[in-house]
Amino acid sequence: MKNRFILILALAIFTTISARSINCLDDLDLEDVQHYKYSIPNSDQEKNPHFWYHSQLNFYAFGKFDDSNSDEETTIRAGIYNGDTLIYKTEINCDKGRWENTILNRFSKYERILSGKIDKNLTSCRAGEPFDLIFKVNNFHAMSWIFNAQPLQYGVREFAKPLQIPKMHQKNGRTIFVTHRKGVKRPAVKVFSKYNAYHATKFILKATGRAKFDRFVFGQCDAWPKGMENQCQNVRSWIHARSKANLTEKSMRDHLKDNPLDTNVTRGLGVFGNNRVVHNPVCLTEKYFNWLQATVHPDQGIPKDDRNMRSVRSYCCCTDMRTGQVYENNPEKHCEFLFVCENEKKSCWEAYDREIGREVQEELEGLANGEQIVEEEEEEEEIDEMNDSSSRLAPVLDVNNTDNSTGVLASEVELIADEVSAARLSPVLTVNNTDNSTGVLAHEPEKEEVTEDEDWSSDLLEEE
């Protein structure tokens, strides 16, 4: 793990660190360019021929459309290359409202394998509008382009996948061996290029017309747009819209019941998505990130063959509550393997911001006092209007307070806050901490339900 972070810290000398990614290898500001070439680290086929094999890679390009008067069509192009040889690219044409994906096939001929229309509800290409383009490598031949939360592919195939280790269970006194996992869903199109994704050495961006790039990110990580400090819930919604979440109408209702702050989340992209839902950031409130993020996206530093890691291949990291980044930008000091955090009951109190804590506490107390005043005013009005209606008030007056007193104001701050501000303050505020303490700000990471269909981790060892 230390070697991996030495590499990150060395690269960080050339990297602009800001509140917009967590544990990415490179996060680079660009100056409204229309051409950018990125050399993928450790991709030398002679020195490191298998460095990225079985690794899920994330490439992010951010930019905006300006108001320049150009005679050229406005296009956005991005591709992954082996040297100067194409592996897989996409082109988005704003003027035509279309996109298309192309490979160099095994016969060294360019082949368009997918095409479609730009979703105008997600992209208007108007001046001043930002855009984002994500390229996700899931395995050798499974790769996804995502433009402004629109998957640039379609079609799903379903099959039974062989298990690496057969499962055994008893049924009617008989031993049953399960050798395949049924109902596995993947994108219908496999990318059979002359070179596969792990032969890539370069990622190239090109734009024409009014499209300009202002940032590029690479790593096994999550990233989001610039300028989203103190906007945890917006960051969470942005990442969720591009994730492997696959919410149905029913599961959306269940999700909102468990996560009342997620009022703006979409259903996600399913098998075409970027990262798993479990790696979405967890928010303390709409503004602030939780100071312990328990399931941060895994990378090269986490072993892939360790059975203890297979189901929990994540880091847990102490986090800056305002930016969502690793606390002090020091992952070597403030990130651990998830199972280590669980065993050591890591609490990350060093990252807890007392000023934010006081602000949240005051907000909770203010909401409780506001509710109390409303109840008092309503009670006075009722008494004035119904002088001899004590029988209607009696059941209310008999409620016990937590301090064993009685009265209409019986309540606890946490309960009132939960009822009054469910849309703004997460109910996880009253859950036990990992260090077994409790309180208004106590919190354990929320648990996202991820179906097997959404879990791509078993593809990490898929054969070429």
Image: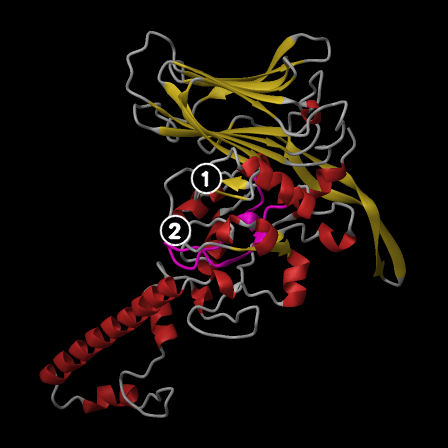
| Of the two numbered discs 1 and 2 in the rendering, the one whose residue sits closer to the viewer | 1
Please check the rendered image and state whether residue 286 is part of the magenta-colored stretch, yes or no. Answer: yes
| Chief SS of the magenta region | loop
Q: Taking 65 as reference, is 251 left or right?
A: right
Q: Taking 421 as reference, is 193 left or right?
A: right
Q: Taking 385 as reference, is 5 left or right?
A: right
> Label 2 belongs to which residue?
263
Q: Residues within 10 Å of mark 1 (few under 14, many from 20)?
A: some
Viewer-nearest residue: 24 or 455: 24
Viewer-nearest residue: 368 or 32: 32
> Label 1 belongs to which residue?
224
Task: Measure how far apart labels 1 and 2 are at the Cα level.
Answer: 19 Å
> Residues at badges 1 and 2 in contact (C-beta under 8 Å)?
no
Q: How is the image coloured?
A: secondary structure
Q: Residues within 10 Å of mark 2 (few under 14, many from 20)?
A: few
- The local secondary structure at tag 2 comes to loop
Q: Residue at x 72, y 38 (%)?
A: 459
Q: Which mark is residue 178?
A: none
- Disc 2 marks a residue whose amino acid type is Thr
- Disc 1 marks a residue whose amino acid type is Trp
Q: Tag 2 or tag 1, which sits nearer the N-term?
A: 1
The correct choice, above or below, for 183 with respect to 319 in the image is above
Q: Position of residue 2 (x, y in %)?
A: 67, 48
The correct choice, above or below, for 383 with respect to 46 in the image is below
Q: Position of residue 200 (x, y in %)?
A: 66, 23
Displayed quadrant of residue 360 = bottom left
Segment tinted magenta in the rendering: 274-298
Displayed quadrant of residue 396 = bottom left
Viewer can see residue 273: no
